[in-house]
Amino acid sequence: MNKVVFDIESLAYPLESFDEEQQEYITKFAKNEEELEDAKLKMNLSPLTAQLLAIGLFNPDSKRGKVLYQSEVKENFFSEDSMIEFVGTDEKGILTTFWEDIKRYNQFITFNGRGFDSPFLILRSAMLGIKPSRNLLPYRYDPKIHCDLLDQLTFYGAFRRYSLDFYCKAFNIKSPKSDGISGLDMKQLYEEKRFKEIAGYCIGDVIATAELYKIWNEYVNV
């Protein structure tokens, strides 16, 4: 079976970029400064308030992958071992290429892909006038097409949900956050135009997810 692991990175637009009514809607439950900052942070998770920065794809069998990431200039290069392709483009280019690439795979693997990545990609594509090529949200209780590891490792909600970083540490997998970058750093990296570092962090998440899938598939999936 041809498999692919994918993961995305997103970044909220500034609150001030929305009109007055939208700003009021986004922040209407915030009663103090701390809750206001929390409301702004949650904007990163919605395709209505955030843009797509990067998508990482990785075949767990061939160990080859690709990162599509936002860049001010179009660029294309490979990692030192030639196993990962880096493609810099605009947001529309990221999504167009993703939907072309995903058609080739029988199974896609994510971590919380049902709760975040997949609906984000579908709605963000609609906002940019791009038609999806695949249904990323098939029947939830059969991982043969979409294996969401957060579903599988919590046994569909029987256990508490943990972050990818937490699962990596529990299963002795190198966490992408071990290099000192987390999703909270995307804003600074983007503003400083450190687009390749965003791409590097994204593919790190994907490779960690692939390692977690390997453990799940060998020891948990029966």
Image (cartoon, helix red, strand yellow):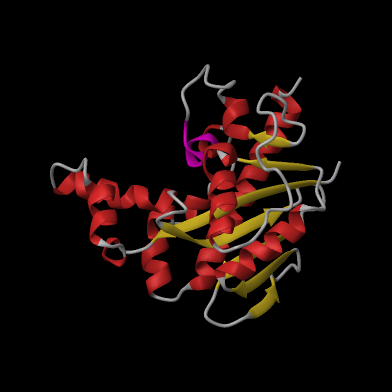
Q: Residue at x 14, y 41 (%)?
A: 31
Of 21 and 147, the residue lying toward us:
21
Q: Residue furthest left?
A: 32
Q: Residue furthest bottom?
A: 73
Q: Residue furthest front?
A: 21
Looking at the rendering, in which quadrant would you find the N terminus? Answer: top right
Query: In the displayed structure, does residue 64 sit left or right of residue 118?
Result: right
Query: In the displayed structure, does residue 93 sit left or right of residue 22?
Result: right
The answer to whether residue 168 is seen in the rendering is: yes
Query: In the displayed structure, does residue 23 sit left or right of residue 172?
Result: left
The answer to whether residue 174 is seen in the rendering is: no
Q: Residue at x 44, y 76 (%)?
A: 193
Residue 142 at x, y = what percent? Answer: 72, 26
Q: How many marks?
A: 0
Q: Residue furthest right?
A: 1
Residue 158 at x, y = what percent? Answer: 53, 16
| Image quadrant in which you'd find residue 188 | bottom left
**Would residue 166 be counted in the magenta stretch?**
yes
Q: Residue at x 43, y 48 (%)?
A: 45
Looking at the rendering, in which quadrant would you find the C terminus? Answer: top right
**Would residue 127 be counted in the magenta stretch?**
no
Of 61 and 7, the residue lying toward us:
7
Which span is picked out in magenta?
162-167
| Image quadrant in which you'd find residue 76 | bottom right
Query: In the displayed structure, does residue 188 sit left or right of residue 205?
Result: left
Q: Which secondary structure dominates the residues rendered in magenta?
A: helix
Residue 83 at x, y = what percent? Answer: 75, 63
Residue 210 at x, y = what percent? Answer: 68, 44
